[in-house]
Structure formats: C-alpha cells, structure tokens
Amino acid sequence: MKSLAILTGAGISAESGLKTFRGPDGLWEGHPVEEVASIEGYLRNPTLVQTFYNQRRKQLIEEGITPNLAHVALAELQRQWEGDFMLITQNVDNLHEKAGSTDVLHIHGELLKARCENSGTVLPWTKNIEPESPCPECSQKKCLRPHIVWFGEMPFYMDEIFERLRSCTHFAAIGTSGLVYPAAGFVEVVSLDARKFEINTDNTPQSNNFDEYFTGPASEQVPLFVEKILGDQKN
Ligand code: NAD
C-alpha cells in the first residue's frame, strides 16, 4: 500500500500573511528567536513570552488570516489519496484545519490551545493568557501557558511519526528550512526507496536528500505537486 507523509513549515503559511521564523534580519516578528521560542526565554521573562503568543493568537483570529491555495491543495490530496496519509506540521497556526485537513500532527503545539502546568490539561484557548487568568481545570492562577513546544522541550507525536516515516513510500517537505530538528532529520529516516519531494522558494541544507524539487511559492507549487503525486498514484 502506498503511504504518504508530508511535513509543512512556516513557509506554507507565509502567503497567508504569517511571517516565517527567521526573517532576513534573523528575527521572528522583531524578536530574537531564543527570546520568545525557548524554555530559558520563558523562564527569564514569562510576561514578554506570554504577550508575544497573545499577539500571535490575536493576529490569527482578528486579522482574518485564511488558508492559501497550498493548504487547500493538501486538504484535497488527503481526500483523494488512496493509502496511508500523514500530515505533520511545525506550524502553530490553524490554517491546515481551516482548509479542511484532518488529523494534523502539530509537533510544535497550537496557538489556539493553552496548557495547565499543574495538571497538564490542554484546553482550547482564544483569549489572551494573563498571569491572573484562572485555569478552568484546577482554578489556580499563574499556571496557564501557551501549548507550544519551545527549544529545550520535546516535540509531540515523535514515536508515532518515526514509526510511520520508516514505512512511507512518498515523503514531501514543504516550506521548511531544514534547520529545526528533529523535523529537519525526518527525510533521513524515510526509507531510501521512498520518493522524496522538496517544495520551497530556496534550497535548504537538506536539499541533497530529496529526489524532486518544486521551486517557488507554495501557493503555486503545492497544487502542481498534488497534481503530480495523484497522477503517479494511478500509475
Ligand atoms: P522557517 O521560518 O525556519 O523556514 C521557512 C522556510 O520556508 C524557508 O526555507 C523558506 O525558504 C521557505 N519559504 C518562505 N516563504 C515560502 C513560500 N511562500 N513558499 C514556499 N516556501 C517558502 O520555518 P520552519 O522550518 O517551519 O521552522 C519554524 C519554526 O517556527 C517552527 O518551529 C514553527 O513552530 C515556528 N513558526 C510557526 C509559524 C506558523 O505557525 N505559521 C510561523 C513562524 C514560526
């Protein structure tokens, strides 16, 4: 049976208006990445980090950020693919779900969820998280944090993903820099016989590990990739 695994990164959401991780200035929305995306940064200045994710959450909800043609094409691919299908994303936005994808594995967590550090409970969350926000689960204050994986923390679903990657027949990495591990190493876990596609505006440090390239913006290239892989499936 054919088995397809897809990994997406910040590049797939860039044309929807969400900035990628490290811009040309090396910053994420004006902040050094270590300041807002590491466990050390959070422990050093929880208010700054909470405010940063409050802004990201607010932007997602209030600026009417919508999926682009790349997200839409992947949702259609999931509907038409006859075989095992796994969509892994490093993105913390909800654009795959908004486009119609299901069972998305958010390995770095989700902006629209909060986690209680006392009970470990994960809650749907659309408001700001403030130090005084009481946890609906344990009623304590100062225990809610964004349900986001920072540098220094273990990404989610790793056992399931590594097991399914080993047996996949097709793998695609879309809009991801090949710099952030463990996701950057997924292409090396996939069997040598699997067909590997990279979709990006640029080369990445992992490009040599792929067999086929769709070079250009995701909104143009992902629909072309989907057309090709659905054609291959019939042959
Ligand atoms: P990255 O920002 O490090 O790299 C983005 C990649 O996308 C680059 O290789 C770039 O060449 C490519 N790219 C940029 N615009 C593109 C386009 N229009 N079409 C195709 N490719 C394009 O992203 P990463 O490797 O995913 O690592 C980012 C980390 O930052 C993740 O951990 C993620 O959680 C977090 N993040 C998430 C979001 C989001 O949820 N939308 C946004 C920023 C950062």
Image: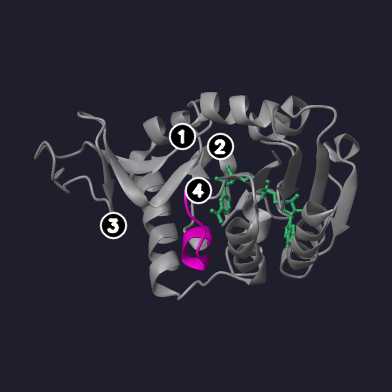
In the image, which is nearer the foreground, mark 3 or mark 4? 4
How far across and how far down the image is residue 204, in percent? 83, 43
**Location of mark 3 (residue):** 128
Q: Which residues are magenta?
A: 96-104
Q: CA distance from mark 2 to mark 1?
A: 6 Å
Q: CA distance from mark 3 to mark 2?
A: 22 Å
Query: Residue drawn 46% across and 34% down?
Result: 41
Q: CA distance from mark 2 to mark 4?
A: 26 Å
Q: Earlier in the sequence, mark 3 or mark 4?
A: 4
Dot 1 alpha-carbon crowd within 10 angstroms: few under 14, some 14 to 19, many 20 or more: some
**Location of mark 4 (residue):** 104
Query: Residue drawn 72% across and 51% down?
Result: 174
Query: Residue drawn 67% across and 65% down?
Result: 70
Amino acid beneath label 1? Gly
Q: Earlier in the sequence, mark 2 or mark 4?
A: 2
Side of 79 where 189 appears, left or right: right
Amino acid beneath label 2? Glu
Q: Are circles 2 and 1 on residues that touch, CB within 8 Å?
A: yes
How far across and how far down the image is residue 218, in percent? 73, 63
Q: Identify which residue, 3 or 140, lies in the foreground.
A: 3
Side of 145 where 102 appears, left or right: right
> In terms of secondary structure, where does tag 2 sit?
helix
- Depicted 1 relative to depicted 163: above or below: below
- Which residue appears farthest toward the left when viewing the image? 139
**Location of mark 2 (residue):** 34
Image quadrant in which you'd find residue 194? top right
Q: Are circles 3 and 1 on residues that touch, CB within 8 Å?
A: no
User: Is residue 117 at all visible to an observer of this figure?
Assistant: yes
**Location of mark 1 (residue):** 41
Number of marks drawn: 4
